Amino acid sequence: MKKAYVFPGQGSQFPGMAKALYDTNATAKEMLEKANEILGFRITDIMFEGTPEDLKATKVTQPAVFLHSVVLAECYDGFSPDMVAGHSLGEFSALAAAGAMDFEDALRLVSIRARAMQKACEIKPSTMAAIIALPDDKVEEICSGCSGMVVPANYNCNGQIVISGEIDAVNEACEKCKAAGAKRALVLQVGGAFHSPLMEPARLELAEGIESTSFKTPVCPVYQNVTAQPSTDPDTIKKNLLAQLTSPVKWTQSVKNMIADGAGYFMEIGPGTVLQGLIKKIAGDTVTVEGITTIE
């Protein structure tokens, strides 16, 4: 039975995240202090003592979730993956944990990505919405028939897909999805249209950082969001990582492909339990699913 380690994305942050690691593990403390230096501000103060509102700022959220996950993987004696994957931002955590990027380089890219996405959100008002209990192909059909720009952004699990785009187009798609039988069509409290063509300005900004970063062959295959396929080739990884900003997160497909390739055990590493819930909905009781948020 193969072991798959998965890494969460934005939205799994919580006040006090990684504090227990910092307080009890010398390696964790060293890595988190190094992160403060690289970022140019004490992100640990916000992670440990900030309010939920403080943690919601994109320039904080993304590096904070990345740090919690990667530091935890580094300090966890049992970390021995046969394959890894991460949801959106979590793909950076997966790549760093699997050795495809150095910790410092990955953190710099995450910081560039966060700031670039924030700027892209400010260029054009946009949003996202969760569509519950409607087949993926029906959601795709509805999005393609809307008058404005709206696209599938996250294939999270069977019967749960997130759409992304211009505010009016997302609202139109929500109404059409409800009329088509969706149980819920809920506009999310997010800053903008992640994983849509509206993130193109951020993609262009991130491209320079990715091109100047050294990528190595990871210790195991990384199932990337854009293709849902395993990658070990550094050039392929770079290309897919850049495309991810404007492309949908194929999480359902990734988990199914990992299971087809022998994964029988999944462990979520980092804050929260979101991915554990999604994997259970995708795989049922056919796999073992666990999570770790700190080391006692």
Image (cartoon, grey):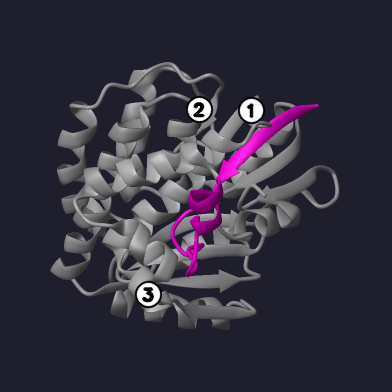
Q: CA distance from mark 2 to mark 3?
A: 36 Å
Please name which of the two marks, 2 or 3, marks the residue nearer to the observer. 2
* Three-letter code, disc 2: Ala
Label 3 packing within 10 angstroms: few (<14), some (14-19), many (20+): many
Q: Is residue 99 above or below residue 279?
A: above
Q: Secondary structure at mark 3?
A: helix
Q: Which label's residue is closer to the chain start, 3 or 1?
A: 1
Mark 2 crowdedness (10 Å alpha carbons): few <14, some 14-19, many ≥20: many
Q: Amino acid at mark 1?
A: Pro
- Reading the image, the residue beneath label 2 is 98
Q: Is residue 88 visible?
A: no
Residue at 57 percent across and 56 percent down: it is 156
**To which quarter of the image does residue 181 belong?**
bottom right
- Amino acid type of disc 3? Val
Which segment is the magenta one? Answer: 1-24
Q: What percent of the width, then of the height, locates residue 247?
A: 37, 48
Residue 175 on image: x %, y %:
47, 83
Residue 32 percent across, percent down from the top left? 38, 46
Mark linked to residue 170 = 3
Say whether marks 1 and 2 touch (CB < 8 Å). Answer: yes
SS category of the residue bearing label 2: loop
Marking on residue 81: 1
